[in-house]
Amino acid sequence: MSQSDTTVKKAEETLGFQTEVKQLLHLMIHSLYSNKEIFLRELVSNASDACDKLRFEAIDKPELLEGGADLEIRVSYDKEARTITIADNGIGLTKAEAVANLGTIARSGTKEFFSQLSGDKQKDAQLIGQFGVGFYSSFIVADKVTVVSRRAGEPVDQAVFWESEGQGEFTVADTEKAERGTSVTLHLRAEEDDFLSGWKLREVLRRYSDHISLPVLMQKEEYDSEKGEQVKKDEWETINQASALWTRAKNEITDEQYTEFYKHVSHDFEEPLAWTHNRVEGRSEYTQLLYLPKHAPFDLYDRDARRGVKLYVKRVFIMDDAEQLLPSYLRFVRGVIDSADLPLNVSREILQESRDVKSIREGSTKRILSLLEDLAENRPEDYAGFWTEFGQVIKEGTGEDMANQERIAKLLRFASTHNDDAIQNVTLADYISRMKEGQDAIYYVTADTFAAAKNSPHLEIFRKKGLEVLLLSDRVDEWMLSHFRQFDGKSFVSVAKGGLDLDKLTDEAEKKHQEEVAESLKPLLERLKTSLGESVKEVKVTNRLVDSPACVVVGQNDVSPHLLRLLKAAGQETPDIKPVLEINPEHALIEKIKGTEGDAFDDWAHVLLDQAMLAEGAQIADPAAYVKRLNGLLLKS
Ligand SMILES: Nc1ncnc2c1ncn2[C@@H]1O[C@H](COP(=O)(O)OP(=O)(O)OP(=O)(O)O)[C@@H](O)[C@H]1O
């Protein structure tokens, strides 16, 4: 007889799953079948979290322990009924919590997650893994799941019964439960008999629960020669090490255990990229076990996303997502920090002001930076993968963490004209080692896209002179450069701003020639300014162009056009900055314009300006007028 048949049930009602749950269930059953064992990891992980939560709540309310402080997880199976049960004596669920937590997904990033699914099983399995499968993974092997739970502190008859076949709906009812905590029973699908074996369950559970600090128990078994099979005994035995992984000595922990622990704390499906495990003594005493994930979560840029690491105080779980323990630009780091100094009743507010937390944050930041430096140095391919996933967030660190700015700067990777492709793999040290004699600045161009940066007319003279330019097209770049002005004594200089001083890189004969040309073009410059009026601040001759007839630049201290566009897109007020039009005296079009008069000259002047704006990636004030003028000129030529 199965559990649901024997349980007292009152006020039974049937409710529908949230649409997203239905979608997730369907996808999971189809995509994760080859990883079906993970349901055990997820359920044991939930049971362990539930015990952690109880231990924490019991600090203030010891009565919640109801006299039983030994927290544990029991796993059993029933061959006849074809069920597996995972039971914990943790915090438990009320009926309302069961309906909310086991019927919906209320998580940031849910929408992005569903929009990224492709229908390709392997890719989707990867994505689902990153998203976190949790409790619902039970349905990979079960065609019915029954949960009976009582929240710690509630009376025996205030327990909840929850059951579902994982299709569209679930049933909830009031019931009774003598022991506090949660018991999850899986009614296995016909083809899942493998799991109905003490040997098989032990094998999988050892792998998935060895890092958990709570004991995981199973009934002892003995071979009965009369029956010719294993028989269960009344005695239970602990099948895992049951000591918190981070408290063990490094040399006693295998990579597999580190990896499993990561999956437990991060809810990630994949292996971590790297980790660092240290016991820190001195001003502040704590243990840190911190991991770098391989892939960025969906909600890396979501303000409400969960971030941060788990905080323990003397091995007692205190809170998830303790974001104060690491700076925001390291928000992707997962793991555990166990402090020996903080009080057990520490709150998020206290964390914000605590000196111990400050020293933990500083220490942990340094450890992560060392881990990244080590990765960059010794596992460059892995670092390249890391950079693709998290590089933009690391760039935030240049402004957020001034104390470590130099170390962060060395971790940065850029695209540049040296390779001319979008892969960000140039370090600032690489750039500096290739600087030309007389060059004292690090040149860069910012644009909305890599293509716009790479094809910017501002780069022409740099390409001609063989000067390398960083090609910046991440949203965070402008922000970064507003905080990060120098590296190794060299300033960052935008190639798109006025006052570009290439003097030292130009020889005397060339300079003389430029001066003569500029002098001879003075009348043309004045005519252009008169024709363009208030649309431009000034018209000048430039030596920065090679193939293009003209470009627009802003003053050295003005906001760049690219930043202006970002600000506008973000709905912010923007200063009204008029560009300077710079013309290329060597270009055939400029030669041609010189000889025109009247309306034709006006048309040329405006076409020149609008083209320069377009090449910059800017919008022009009157596109229709531009097209009309251009067509007129084309017809005449
Ligand atoms: N054994 C349990 N005891 C008490 N509450 C539980 C238990 N199992 C699940 N829950 C509740 O149900 C919620 C949903 O669980 P689920 O495993 O789906 O997601 P999760 O653990 O929060 O996140 P993730 O998807 O990242 O694993 C949990 O957050 C918890 O509140």
Image (spheres, helix red, strand yellow):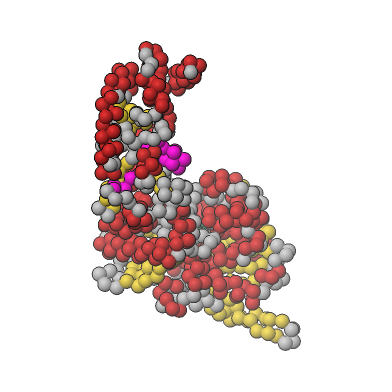
Query: In the drawing, does residue 48 fall left or right of residue 539?
Result: right
Residue 449 is one of the magenta-drawn residues: yes
Which region of the structure is painted magenta? 439-458
**Is 116 placed above or below 332 here?**
above
- Taking the view exactly as shown, the residue that stands out farthest to the front is 509
Residue at image point 42% right, 72% down: 246
Query: Measuring 28% from the left and 20% from the top, which residue is drawn there?
Result: 523
Up the image or down, 547 lies above or below 29; here it is above
Image coords of residue 580 (percent x, y)? 31, 29
- Identified at 58% across, 62% down, the residue is 148
Residue 328 or residue 521, whichever sits in front: 521
Along the viewing direction, whichever of 237 and 95 lies nearer the viewer:
237
Is 390 one of the magenta-colored residues?
no
- Which residue is nearer to you in this view: 456 or 287? 456
Q: Residue 125's image quarter?
A: bottom right
Relative to 63, residue 229 above or below: below
Please state, as top left, top right, bottom left or bottom right, where the N terminus lies in the image. Answer: bottom right
Residue lying at the far bottom of the rendered structure: 225
Q: Quadrant of residue 587?
A: top left
